[in-house]
Image (spheres, rainbow, N blue to C red):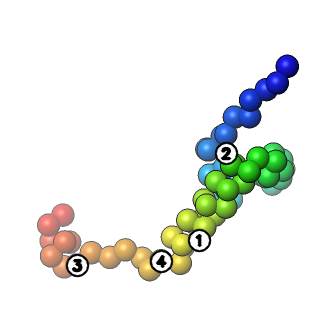
Amino acid sequence: MSTMHKHNHDLIAALAEGVLAADLADQAEADILTCAECSADLADQRAALAALQAAPPATLTAVESSEL
């Protein structure tokens, strides 16, 4: 009997964000790396997070602030 791999996008995001306990993160990464699609999703998540961390903080103009 074959089983279908389920892509757990929440787990991939949590792993990329570094919010999993170390033992769970190690197991999740090992599992994710066995699937090309999941591996690509993890790489994309990590790249997106790195880009967001490198971006300057968002600011409002005086006009935008006055309209809040």
**Alpha-carbon span between mark 1 and mark 2:** 18 Å
| Amino acid at pointer 2 | Leu
| Amino acid at pointer 3 | Thr
Specify whether 38 is left or right of 52.
right
Whether residue 20 is visible: no
Residue beneath disc 3: 61
Residue beneath disc 4: 55
Alpha-carbon neighbours of circle 1 within 10 Å: few (<14), some, or many (≥20)?
few
Residue beneath disc 2: 11
Q: Position of residue 35 (x, y in %)?
A: 76, 47
Q: CB under 8 Å between callouts 4 and 3?
A: no
Per the image, label 3 sits on a secondary structure element best described as loop
Q: Disc 4 or 3, which lies upstream in sequence?
A: 4
Residue beneath disc 1: 50
Per the image, label 4 sits on a secondary structure element best described as loop
Q: Disc 2 or 4, which lies upstream in sequence?
A: 2
| Amino acid at pointer 4 | Ala
Q: Disc 1 or 2, which lies upstream in sequence?
A: 2
The residue depicted at 67 percent of the width and 39 percent of the height is 7
Q: CB under 8 Å between callouts 1 and 2?
A: no
Per the image, label 1 sits on a secondary structure element best described as helix
**Alpha-carbon span between mark 2 and mark 4:** 25 Å
